[in-house]
């Protein structure tokens, strides 16, 4: 509420000085618009200045509102009308008729805008006065063209985060409301492209044709709109698909120290979706540009970029762009989910995302909490990951499967951000640096990893063939520790250790070489039948590769049946075991 003794400033900028009659009309408009219980006519102060830069017409500024009747304002209105015309044109549109209607119905009005003033700017943050009605998450445009988003609403001012450099913004610069929520363009044209957090292409391949515009912040699907997870999202990684299966619509955390293969698991999962009708979105947060370029090149070589969107906010970009990157990627994924498609989205990684948000919050003078993170850092990730779901048939049946990545320090999973994300997700794949250094890759720790969906996300074939592999590995790891101090072992213990060594070798998998579901089933069936017990450890991977080729060649009907039906009965098991033993005899003779 304005005080009674405070002047209400009105400034008229013109090219040609208005006549007394024109000036009286302008004053009558202002009195009719602004005179109320708080503002009387004698409180309104008029001033007029000449401004040749307008080209023509005038601009009237009343308080924090602007009425633009200049040449520039009228040109902008016509340009907006043309843009609306372009968006409505399709292959069967009568362009001449539409153009005639647009011109006939076009009417120039004084453009009305809410304009504020920058009172402070620095470190990617701008404080603005004079925009009391701005909403949280609304896009603002500064007079230099930089966009910002309202992030903090205070008693007498607002604070905005800037989506660009703040070098051209000065104290006193004008800021205009757009009354638009922050969002990104979406559409089929984004597949195979690399874009920034604002949906702008950065791969040098030209403009992207968008189909729609979606807000980056969106409500998660309600419980009644969701369906239980029962369809596998196969990663092609034997260690994961056999013991910690991921289902479509699930959120499975990948967690581990730096340089333990977290991104490699996500990349292999994307590559494994080739030909399966799954759209992939990879969001890189706070990474080096060279790292992202290398990943894009690997996806291109594997033929996976055609169905993948890469959203990147590199380490050199401002914290606001890193903050909105995962939400922008999720908005792109939701566009495809709404069409009934299955989407896989990777957030790499949310540790850096939390750090970017912490920087913004401290600059916005919000009170710090544990590890200097703000109090709403849990909500930061929960509102993002809850948008991943599998929708029921009434809502289209689409899904978003999320693979968030978290980097730990010295294996500490009890730190603030790791525990937060663990509690939000439906399981975690824990990668251990000790295993990685021993050459076990992927370095999955069987004891700390879990999938809360479990066998519901496995085919019958995978569930039956995996059997007790996880228990066997746990017993092997425990037995291995105790037998270090003993040289005299009984036959059962030796057999258990030998079986464990075989499993550990089989779970090693090179980068970019995902296994199909039927190949995993054959491998596990042969391993559980103890076919490979007498093969030297360094020959097991060679035996596995040649065994898969042999069965594919000698019994393609069996392989095809596992692939198409997903079933696995005793007769199939016996056929695989017999074929494995036959091949073993040939292999030992080589």
Image (tube, rainbow, N blue to C red):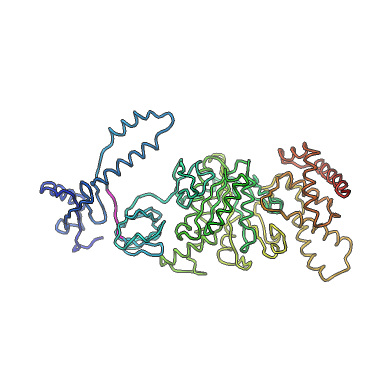
Magenta-drawn stretch, dominant element (helix, strand or loop): strand
For the N terminus, the image quarter is bottom left
State the image coordinates of residue 281 (x, y, percent, origin top left).
55, 48
Residue numbers of the magenta segment: 112-117
State the image coordinates of residue 580 (x, y, percent, origin top left).
83, 46
- Pick out the residue farthest to the front: 204
Does 523 sit left or right of 341 as displayed?
right
Between residues 290 and 385, which one lies in front from this camera angle? 290
Q: Residue at x 16, y 58 (%)?
A: 45
Q: Is residue 232 above or below residue 478?
A: above
Q: Is residue 103 above or below residue 25?
A: above
Q: Quadrant of residue 497?
A: bottom right
Does 351 sit left or right of 469 as displayed?
left
Does 545 sit left or right of 111 as displayed?
right
Q: Quadrant of residue 96?
A: top left
Does the magenta run of residues contain 114? yes
- Pick out the residue farthest to the bottom: 485
Q: Residue at x 70, y 63 (%)?
A: 435
Q: Quadrant of residue 5?
A: bottom left
- Pick out the residue farthest to the left: 20
State the image coordinates of residue 543 (x, y, percent, origin top left).
80, 50
State the image coordinates of residue 3 (x, y, percent, origin top left).
22, 63
Does the magenta run of residues contain 491? no
């Amino acid at each position: 509420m304005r005080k009674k003794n405070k002047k209400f400033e009105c400034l008229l900028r013109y090219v040609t000085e208005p006549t007394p009659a024109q000036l009286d009309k302008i004053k009558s408009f202002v009195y009719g618009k602004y005179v109320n219980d708080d503002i009387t006519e004698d409180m309104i102060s008029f001033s007029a200045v000449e401004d040749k830069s307008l080209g023509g017409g005038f601009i009237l500024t009343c308080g924090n509102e602007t009425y633009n009747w200049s040449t520039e304002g009228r040109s902008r209105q016509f340009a907006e009308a043309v843009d609306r015309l372009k968006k409505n044109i399709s292959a069967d549109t009568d362009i001449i008729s539409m153009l005639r209607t647009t011109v006939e119905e076009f009417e120039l009005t004084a453009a009305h805008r809410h304009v504020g003033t920058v009172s402070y700017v620095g470190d990617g943050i701008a404080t603005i006065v004079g925009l009391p009605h701005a909403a949280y998450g609304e896009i603002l445009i500064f007079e230099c063209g930089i966009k910002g988003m309202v992030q903090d609403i205070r008693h007498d001012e607002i604070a905005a985060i800037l989506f660009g450099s703040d070098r051209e913004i000065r104290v006193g610069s004008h800021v205009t409301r757009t009354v638009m929520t922050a969002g990104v363009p979406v559409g089929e044209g984004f597949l195979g492209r690399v874009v920034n957090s604002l949906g702008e292409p950065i791969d040098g391949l030209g403009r992207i044709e968008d189909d729609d515009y979606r807000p980056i912040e969106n409500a998660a699907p309600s419980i009644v709109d969701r369906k239980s997870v029962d369809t596998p999202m196969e990663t092609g990684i034997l260690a994961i698909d056999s013991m910690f299966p991921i289902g479509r619509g699930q959120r499975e955390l990948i967690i581990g120290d730096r340089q333990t293969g977290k991104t490699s698991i996500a990349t292999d999962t994307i590559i494994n979706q080739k030909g399966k009708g799954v759209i992939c979105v990879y969001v890189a947060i706070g990474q080096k540009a060279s790292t992202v370029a290398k990943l894009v090149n690997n996806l291109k070589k594997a033929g996976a970029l055609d169905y993948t969107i890469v959203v990147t906010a590199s380490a050199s970009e401002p914290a606001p762009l890193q903050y909105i990157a995962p939400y922008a990627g999720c908005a792109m994924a939701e566009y495809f989910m709404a069409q009934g498609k299955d989407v896989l989205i990777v957030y790499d990684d949310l540790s850096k995302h939390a750090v970017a948000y912490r920087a913004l919050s401290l600059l916005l003078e919000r009170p710090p909490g544990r590890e200097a993170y703000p109090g709403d850092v849990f909500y930061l990730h929960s509102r993002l990951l809850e948008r991943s779901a599998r929708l029921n048939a009434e809502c289209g049946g689409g899904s978003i499967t999320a693979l968030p990545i978290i980097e730990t320090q010295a294996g500490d999973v009890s730190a603030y951000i790791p525990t937060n994300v663990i509690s939000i997700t439906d399981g975690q794949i824990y990668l251990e640096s000790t295993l990685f250094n021993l050459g076990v890759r992927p370095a999955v720790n069987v004891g700390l990893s879990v999938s809360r969906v479990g066998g519901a996300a496995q085919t019958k074939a995978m569930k039956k063939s995996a059997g007790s592999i996880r228990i066997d590995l746990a017993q092997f790891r425990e037995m291995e520790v105790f037998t270090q101090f003993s040289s005299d072992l009984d036959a059962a213990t030796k057999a258990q250790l030998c079986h464990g060594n075989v499993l550990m070798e089989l779970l090693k998998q090179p980068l970019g070489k995902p296994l199909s579901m039927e190949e995993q089933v054959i491998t596990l069936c042969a391993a559980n039948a103890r076919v490979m017990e007498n093969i030297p450890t360094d020959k097991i991977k060679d035996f596995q590769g040649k065994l898969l080729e042999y069965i594919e060649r000698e019994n393609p009907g069996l392989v095809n049946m596992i692939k198409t039906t997903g079933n696995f009965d005793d007769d199939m098991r016996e056929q695989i075991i017999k074929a494995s033993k036959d091949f073993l005899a040939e292999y030992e003779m080589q």
